[in-house]
Amino acid sequence: MVQNVLITGISGSVGHYVLDLLKDDPRYHLYLVVRKPQNIRRDLSGYKNISFIQDDIRNVHKYHEILQTIDQAILIATTWGGFKEPWQINVYATFRLLRRMDKARLKKVIYFSTASILDRDHKPVGAIREIGTNYIRSKFLTHKMFQYHPLKEKIHILYPTWVYGGGKNYPWSHAAAGLAGLKPWIGFLQYFTFDFSFHFIHCADIAKMVVYMLDHDMPKRDYVLGNARHTVGDFLRGVAAYYGHKPPLFQICIPMGLIQFLGKIGNKHSWDAYCMKYRHFNYDVLNCKKLGIPTTTDTVEGMMKEMME
């Protein structure tokens, strides 16, 4: 039996990779929510299993008849900037949409949050209420509201770490937009590091895990998505290796005090200052290898090859 799958955020980098994996799968009929279909870098005119809801995400709750037929939903759409937009899109639009769905028919909701709202124990960071950006605070609020939602047992929340993706056939992700500009400087930059570490995940791997979750029952409701944790120095060495540079014999560690001082004089947001102070974003992560899914983008070099070639 064909399942109806609603997908928001399809025109972004993650959305394109998800689309590539699902568009030729006869088990699914895709309802793609997109304000401007021309932003999708694929010719979908011949696909009978794809329908468009051409509207702003804030209006999707009005498509009551379609929402009543949805079996699974993948909610990727988000906004990072603005004053009202994070609340309107990341919070209100999400809950209005879910309210219109048939609770008996709906099997699963895969919702995209961000690992930034979690501490090392996977608990929400309480300080977000005071120092978070509007984007971070909106994701924090959505997380809290989901804990009391009538559909909470059907909602799987994904918390991606640093998301990289983009290239010739894909839009650039938020974090990857400046990577191409490192090429002239990376031979020099690989000799530096500072006391900061993080996980990363490529959009291709995120898409593979999303499709896996559509097809399988998952033992938990919440997952942080990421590969092995890297220091800044590790990451820079990996980028340099992709461009053919030999590994540096040493790395100079820039004092965090200097990084924090530069942030202050640059009028960085208080959330950026918090991140610089927290420094080590270490999580118990889920990735393709843990699910037995083949991947070539779980290393820095593999990620760079996927994006740059």
Image (spheres, rainbow, N blue to C red):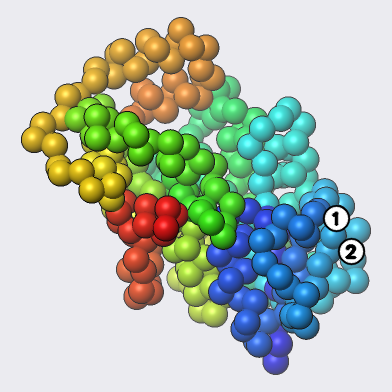
Which comes before the other along the chain, label 2 or label 1?
1
Q: In the displayed structure, does residue 243 sit left or right of residue 309?
A: left
Which residue is situated farthest in the top direction here?
265
Provide the residue designation for mark 1: 55
Q: How far is mark 2 from mark 1, CA to CA?
A: 10 Å
Q: What residue is rendered at 53% in x and 56% in y?
A: 168
Q: What residue is rendered at 67% in x and 67% in y?
A: 42
Q: Quadrant of residue 62?
A: bottom right
| Observer able to see residue 123 | no
Quarter holding the N terminus?
bottom right
Q: In the displayed structure, does residue 60 sit left or right of residue 197?
A: right
Residue 278 position (above or below residue 80): above
Q: Residue 172 placed where, x, y %? A: 55, 48
Q: Residue 269 placed where, x, y %? A: 54, 19
141 and 49: which is toward the camera: 49
Provide the residue designation for mark 2: 63
| Observer able to see residue 134 | yes
191 and 94: which is toward the camera: 191
Q: Amino acid at mark 1?
A: Asp
Which residue is situated farthest in the bottom direction here?
1
Q: What residue is rendered at 59% in x and 39% in y?
A: 140
Regarding mark 2 in the picture, which secondary structure is present there?
loop
Q: In the displayed structure, does residue 221 sit left or right of residue 295?
A: right
Q: Quadrant of residue 67?
A: bottom right
Q: Residue 2 placed where, x, y %? A: 71, 87
Regarding mark 1 in the picture, which secondary structure is present there?
loop
Residue 24 position (above or below residue 189): below
